[in-house]
Image (tube, rainbow, N blue to C red):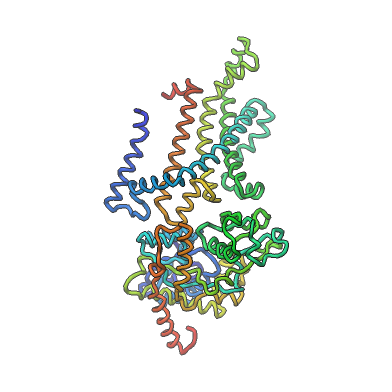
Amino acid sequence: MACLAGAAASGCKRDPRPLRRVRVTFLPHYILAPVYLASELGFFEQAGIELLVHEVASATQMAPLLAAGTVDVAFSGAIPSMLNAAAKGARIRIVCARETAIPGCIHEVHGYRKSFPEGFHRAAELRGKRISVTAPTSLSAFLLDVLLESAGLGASDVHLLTMPLSESAPALAAGRIDAVLDRDMGLSSPDIIPGPSVAELLPGFQYNFILFGDALLQNDVSAGAGFLAAYLRGVGEFRAGKKPRALQQLAAGSGLAAAGPGPVCLDRLSENGQVDRMSVQRVIDWSSRKKFLVRPIDAAEVIDGRFAEEAQRLNGAQHRLNGGQLP
Amino acid sequence: MKRLVWALWLPLLALAAWQIASGAGVLNPLFFPAPSALANSAVRLIKSGELLRNAAATLGRTAAGFLIGSAAGLGIGLLMGGIQGVRKSLQPMVGALNATPKMSLLPVLMLLLGVGEAAPITLIALGSMVIVSLHTFDAVEQIRPIWVEIAINYGANRGALFARVYLPACLPRVFTGLRLALANALVIAVACELINPSTGLGSMIWLSWQTFSTDRLWIALLATALIGGVLHEGLRQLEKRIVPWQAAHFE
């Protein structure tokens, strides 16, 4: 657990006010840039928060950390481990939307050029192919199922493999597998081509969220809302073109150029944080069909919208205070 | 029977302590479900066939890799012990391979052999081969020249020398190598299943982790430990039959 890298000038420095420590966990990725930006610009400090970051290598590591109270906030999808932890009684709730599927923004599937000699434009071309996802419970597996269903295909029509991106990327480049499902793959090889966009099948689908653990899920929403308000201000700044000092490092970690994503892709970052219940329910229903859940869950059980609403109110007040200018 | 009591009292005591701690609320049931709850889940998993199916997959990979690797290791170890040129050529490579974390070779093997069963079984075989060859080589090295001289003086030919001197002298150490290699084979099999999960106890552990199903995770872990213990004991019993003088020494 360490103070946010590159944020020593603001979020981590000594302050006469007693700052509340908020422990955050995420997979390092350029789309986390708003967190770094909010920290560098002192938004968290202004909200009375000192940010402590616990980076993990896999999204599933977050659920135990959050359930055990080792961290207070997780930047994650509505993955089965989170849903099951909540279903088993752990105080974990989805409190803020982060990313929405925007057609043309990212390519969720990539193929080996020689495996698709006619081009890789339609999901139907996946029939009979060796396809890798990071885990059967992952968002990539969900997206693959969406793609296959759109083409009237099922799991038995493809050869499904599970392996981390660190292995699937070289395996794809070597032609050992035909396609890889993973959004934002930083693949740059002439032998690898992008495939059809899942976002076109699921426009407006929210796939990444902020989750709070017990420490922030209090009746008094001020601490949690303050955290979200600072984060959403970071989103606003990032979308407006500001970049954190850590972006190069984050982009490299995501296998992307330091410049990060193009402007259209920033639209996928939610600015108001409002959680779309249907998106969460869609993943829950898929997880349930796959028998990943310990019991049926209603999305309303795992969503707490109070914090995002209060955060919006706080940011609206801040905006007015600044005479309509970004703070 | 007495031996069984000695082997089981400590794990049973640990389980009892776990049950009491769970009942008293000392352990978080999210992470440490009570052993009684685990037993119920285990019964369900056995009835559904899931546990046995996965255990069989792990055992299959372990056995295939172990048998291939051990046979190769035995041959290489004997050759290294008996022929100086082979020893000089292979010893540095086997030593280097022994010091290499085996799991780090998996991506390379996957690139060479593809993403099926070939890569994990080759890795298990490689791990077994290294351990068995080193122990076999060591065993051959430990044979006292006087034993060979006496046997020759009594008229032993090459076949008799191998059957009556080399083999009996090597077997205890070879069996030590086989026991270590078997445990190592199980470890590599489960580790491969954790990385490339399809079937097996490792994939069950991994999927349980992915879905925060801690009861299934514990059951798969305990099943792996149980299999490890049973394999170890099985080989020990085999050793008792084949190398009775060594067993008598330990008894």
Image location (x, y in percent) of residue A169: 62, 58
Residue at figure coordinates x 55%, y 47% from the top left: B192
A16 or A91: which is nearer to us?
A: A91
Q: In this view, does B108 lie to the left or right of A143?
A: right
User: Which quarter of the rendering shows the N terminus of chain A?
Assistant: bottom left
B230 or A295: which is nearer to us?
A: A295
Using the rendered view, name the quadrant where residue B90 is placed. top right
Residue A144 visible in image: yes
Residue at figure coordinates x 52%, y 72% from the top left: A205
Image location (x, y in percent) of residue B62: 54, 39
Using the rendered view, name the quadrant where residue A53 is placed. bottom left
Residue at figure coordinates x 65%, y 28% from the top left: B79
Q: Residue furthest top?
A: B154
Residue A253 visible in image: no
Figure check: B238 above or below A60: above
Figure check: A233 above or below A249: below
Please state the total of marks drawn on the protein image.
0
B103 or A163: which is nearer to us?
A: A163
Figure check: A81 above or below B59: below
Q: Is residue A37 left or right of residue A16?
A: right
